Image (spheres, coloured by chain):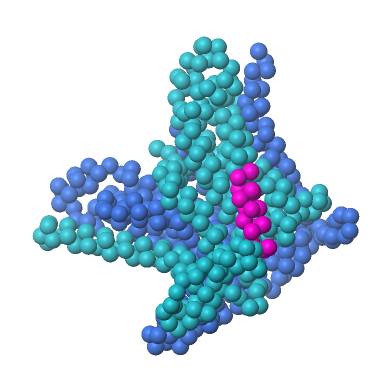
Chain colours: A cyan, B blue
């Protein structure tokens, strides 16, 4: 076949596939956002009979942010944000220290402990969560934000962030460290003066990842929270058993829930693409 | 000079403490739970030793065969679906074209948003009375189907949504793998007269093998633990048609409050996962400790 023709066909095919891909991904998200800006009646008419809506409205967001549903939703948003921020702060700090200790020193059992971290990520969360539920109840931490925080940050996110930062830690050449050692710096100074500046993009990537992970966290609050410590994903989950579902309102809540991660990914995408690849493969 | 050797442990200690309290200890506690039964009373809990009873229950539970069936079907379908979709998309996205960056960013979004939100959106799309998908089909002449109330359709859609959620990650995996294939290999093959399919079969696939295996294992491990979408869409499905093993553990523990049985189910599940994990770890370590 003519080479030029082949190239054109290839180009067309590529664009077709890309367009299909974009529709495949964007369509449900666009639908959710559109739904959230329609009134309940117009939405059910649009979705149920394809009758085009006549106007957009902010009434759902009003309802959810300072109207009748705000008692349910606003504290949930605050809890989600608090949980995500505190977890990120804790996990990245502790994870930095831990990955430093793991990667830049030699000691026995290092590889074993490292494999253990990987192993934990494979294990089903439920395996820990069943006993953790009992533990939280026994310690009176059930349905408390602190309870959620400490389990999420210390138990789940920190090992992951440690692992994530380790590959970055390992990519810094030994000579940099040795030069500082000759100058008489101790390990803490080396960490603070040398590694920290070098690792800033890595730390940012880890922080973003941790924030998104903690914001999205659903399983832990499902088990360990019910009213006081409710988070936004949990509110969405509670819609499952609604008697008279308000679709437009729930789409508004859903949109609110997906805005932070989406914004982060869109604005800071280069950290993700690099970060995901660094975590997955190192060559 | 001896205390120098302890320095790394100071750095590792906080993380290790957290892991000990919230991972090691629960693992042990869970093991004990699986050999007992628990009752919540004001002031604490009562633990009653029951031996292997919970484990025998797994083999005599009438629901387990169906659950195993559903689980295997679900994992096979979602893993194969995700991998095929990701591979094809990665192959096309590997070229340079206008809007590539936007496409990539868009691809990240289903992975980034909370899975429960995705479940909710799809649930609305599939709603029995007003869902858009049903409406469109209706306009095309079909009767309105209440997808999530039919065992087969529910299973199909739960798998579909799980693939939708999971494929960005696998896509990026494949993309990164593809980028490490030096383009001059393709050029050399072109000069030798190799056609597109030949180039794919003899260059791309073999060089992608490590990534492919990694993605496969990672996907299996991940999909076997799928929960949020199932929870939101079907709650286990019409007549357990979408109850996978992991979901069943949750139902037993937190809906029926059989903590001991739930723990036993979880541990049993873990045995299988451990075997997978060993391969996963071997793969990951190979690329970590260069």
Does the magenta stretch mainly form a helix, a strand or a loop? Answer: helix
User: Where is B93 relative to A150, above or below?
Assistant: below
Pick the quarter of the image with the C terminus of chain A. top left
Is residue A171 visible from the viewing direction of this image? yes
* A236 or A137: nearer the viewer: A236
Q: Position of residue B176 (x, y in %)?
A: 37, 46
Q: Position of residue B281 (x, y in %)?
A: 53, 44
User: Where is B13 relative to B141, above or below?
Assistant: above
User: Where is A58 relative to A180, above or below?
Assistant: below
| Residue at point 61%, 40% (across, down) | A89
Q: Is residue B50 left or right of residue A150?
A: right
Pick the quarter of the image with the N terminus of chain A. bottom left
User: Where is B107 relative to A152, above or below?
Assistant: below
Q: Which residues are magenta?
A: A71-86
Q: Is residue A221 left or right of residue B47?
A: left
- For this orientation, the residue located farthest to the top is A183
Whether residue A78 appears in magenta in the rendering, the answer is: yes
Is residue A125 visible from the viewing direction of this image? no
Q: Position of residue B250 (x, y in %)?
A: 68, 63
């Amino acid at each position: 076949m003519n080479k030029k023709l082949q190239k054109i066909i290839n180009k067309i095919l590529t664009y077709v596939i890309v367009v299909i891909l974009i529709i495949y991904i964007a369509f449900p998200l666009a639908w959710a956002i559109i739904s959230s800006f329609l009134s309940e009646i117009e939405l059910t008419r649009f979705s149920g009979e394809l009758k085009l809506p006549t106007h957009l409205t902010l009434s759902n967001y009003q309802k959810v942010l300072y109207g009748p549903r705000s008692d349910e939703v606003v504290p949930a948003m605050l809890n989600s944000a608090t949980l995500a921020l505190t977890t990120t702060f804790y996990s990245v700090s502790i994870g930095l220290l831990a990955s430093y200790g793991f990667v830049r020193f030699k000691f026995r059992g290092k590889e074993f402990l490292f494999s253990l971290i990987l192993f934990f990520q494979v294990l089903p969360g439920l395996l820990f969560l069943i006993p953790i539920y009992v533990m939280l109840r026994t310690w009176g931490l059930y349905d408390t934000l602190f309870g959620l925080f400490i389990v999420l940050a210390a138990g789940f996110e920190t090992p992951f962030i440690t692992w994530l930062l380790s590959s970055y830690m390992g990519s810094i050449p030994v000579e940099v460290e040795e030069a500082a050692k000759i100058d008489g710096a101790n390990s803490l100074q080396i960490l603070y003066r040398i590694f920290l500046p070098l690792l800033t993009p890595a730390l940012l990537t880890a922080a973003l990842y941790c924030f998104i992970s903690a914001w999205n966290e659903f399983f832990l609050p499902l088990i360990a929270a019910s009213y006081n410590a409710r988070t936004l994903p949990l509110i969405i989950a509670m819609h499952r058993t609604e008697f008279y579902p308000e679709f437009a309102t729930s789409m508004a809540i859903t949109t609110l829930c997906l805005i932070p991660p989406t914004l982060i990914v869109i604005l800071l995408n280069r950290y993700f693409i690099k970060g995901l690849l660094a975590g997955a493969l190192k060559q | 000079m001896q205390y120098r050797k302890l320095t790394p442990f100071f750095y590792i200690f906080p993380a290790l403490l957290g892991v000990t309290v919230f991972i090691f200890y629960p693992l042990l506690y869970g093991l004990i739970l699986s050999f007992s039964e628990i009752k919540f009373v004001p002031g604490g809990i009562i633990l009653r030793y029951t031996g292997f009873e919970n484990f025998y229950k797994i083999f005599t539970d009438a629901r387990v065969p169906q659950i195993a069936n559903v689980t295997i079907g679900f994992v096979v379908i979602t893993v194969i679906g995700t991998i095929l979709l990701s591979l094809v998309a990665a192959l096309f996205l590997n070229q340079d074209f206008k809007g590539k960056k936007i496409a990539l960013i868009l691809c990240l979004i289903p992975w980034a948003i909370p899975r429960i939100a995705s479940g909710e959106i799809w649930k609305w799309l599939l709603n029995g009375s007003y869902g858009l998908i049903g409406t469109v089909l209706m306009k095309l002449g079909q009767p309105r189907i209440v997808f999530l109330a039919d065992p087969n359709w529910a299973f199909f859609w739960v798998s579909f949504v799980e693939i939708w959620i999971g494929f960005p990650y696998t896509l990026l995996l494949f993309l990164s793998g593809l980028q490490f294939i030096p383009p001059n290999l393709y050029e050399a093959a072109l000069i030798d007269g190799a056609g597109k399919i030949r180039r794919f079969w003899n260059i791309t696939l073999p060089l992608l093998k490590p990534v492919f295996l990694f993605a496969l294992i990672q996907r299996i491990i991940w999909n076997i633990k799928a929960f949020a979408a199932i929870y939101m869409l079907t709650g286990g499905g019409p007549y357990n048609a979408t109850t996978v093993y992991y979901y069943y553990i949750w139902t037993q523990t937190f809906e029926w409050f059989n903590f001991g049985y739930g723990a036993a189910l979880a541990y049993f599940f873990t045995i299988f996962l451990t075997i997978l994990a060993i391969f996963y770890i071997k793969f990951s370590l190979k690329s970590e400790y260069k």
